[in-house]
């Protein structure tokens, strides 16, 4: 059996300001730094054999806060980088709603049908992330690994491992610095929990809306 902890990076200023991030390398804010320390601390008593992260700094710093309790190095993994929002990257949500009204409505109602202008679709994200995960499962048989990525890749990965289609994208919640646990056993994925943020309660902040 192989266990996979799937973690979302901590909070950034653009999460609060509702700006589409994608491939733009936005750092953690002060709250995000506290969140990822707590996320790492929550896993400190678990034996993790390898940690892989999106190469963007907000994910790498999150992964490093897990790694510091495990005394192992983080391996950057391009395949789990955030979705390319294309022309939406760096744009505020209210501006996107106004400029791309029809496409944004489609994104909310039928996200699996959207390809972002000069960007990616959810299916492209699913293909690249799952190809990487399948290889990691082969490499780390009977071990425990952590993957640290972003809202969209994490939601898509969760859909895939749960055996549901990308059209269910909005049914998966992924708050900042949340953790999910899956196990691969007897050629099937088993879910232990989704979107755990219990260790963040000491910060006294409500769960961030799904952005």
Image (cartoon, rainbow, N blue to C red):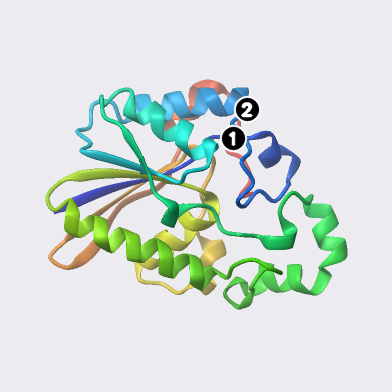
Of residue 12 and residue 196, the one placed in the foreground of this image is 12
Q: Residue 141: give x, y in percent of width and height.
A: 13, 53
Mark 1 neighbour density, 10 Å: few (under 14) some (14–19) many (20 or more): many
Residue closest to the far right: 98
Mark 2 neighbour density, 10 Å: few (under 14) some (14–19) many (20 or more): some
Report the side of 182 relative to 37 (left or right): left
Report the side of 69 relative to 61 (left or right): left
Report the side of 38 relative to 133 (left or right): right
Residue at the image point whose x is 25% and y is 61% from the top: 135
Q: Quadrant of residue 17?
A: top right
**Residue occupied by mark 1:** 11
Q: Residue 92: give x, y in percent of width and height.
A: 79, 49
Q: Residue 174: give x, y in percent of width and height.
A: 51, 49
Residue at the image point whose x is 59% and y is 31% from the top: 28
Residue at the image point whose x is 17% and y is 68% from the top: 187
**Residue occupied by mark 2:** 29
Can you tell which mark lies on residue 42?
none
Q: Residue 3: give x, y in percent of width and height.
A: 22, 49
Tell me if label 2 and label 1 are in contact, CB under 8 Å: yes
Q: Quadrant of residue 176?
A: top right
Circle 1 sits in a helix, a strand or a loop, which is it?
A: loop
Q: In this view, does 161 lie above or below 177?
A: below
Q: Quadrant of residue 12?
A: top right
Residue at the image point whose x is 30% and y is 23% from the top: 69
Of residue 97 and residue 91, the one placed in the foreground of this image is 91
Q: From mark 2 to mark 1, how far is it between C-alphas?
A: 6 Å
Report the side of 138 relative to 154 (left or right): left
Circle 2 sits in a helix, a strand or a loop, which is it?
A: loop
Of residue 54 and residue 96, the one placed in the foreground of this image is 54
Which of the marked residues, 2 or 1, is nearer the chain's N terminus? 1
């Amino acid at each position: 059996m192989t266990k996979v902890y799937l973690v979302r990076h901590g909070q950034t200023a653009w999460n609060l300001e509702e700006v589409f991030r994608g491939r733009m390398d936005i750092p953690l804010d002060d709250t995000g730094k506290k969140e990822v320390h707590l996320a790492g601390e929550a896993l400190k008593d678990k034996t993790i054999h390898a940690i892989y992260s999106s190469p963007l700094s907000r994910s790498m710093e999150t992964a490093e806060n897990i790694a510091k309790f495990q005394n192992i190095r983080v391996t950057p993994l391009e395949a789990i980088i955030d979705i390319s929002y294309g022309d939406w990257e760096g744009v505020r949500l209210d501006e996107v709603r106004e400029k791309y009204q029809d496409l944004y409505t489609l994104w909310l109602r039928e996200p699996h049908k959207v390809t972002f202008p000069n960007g990616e679709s959810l299916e492209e994200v699913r293909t690249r992330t799952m190809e990487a995960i399948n290889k990691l499962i082969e490499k780390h048989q009977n071990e425990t690994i952590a993957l640290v990525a972003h809202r969209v890749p994490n939601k898509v990965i969760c859909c895939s491992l749960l055996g549901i289609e990308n059209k269910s994208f909005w049914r998966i919640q992924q708050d900042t610095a949340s953790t999910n646990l899956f196990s691969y056993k007897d050629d099937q994925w088993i879910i232990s929990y989704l979107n755990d943020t219990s260790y963040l309660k000491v910060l006294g902040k409500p769960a961030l809306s799904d952005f």
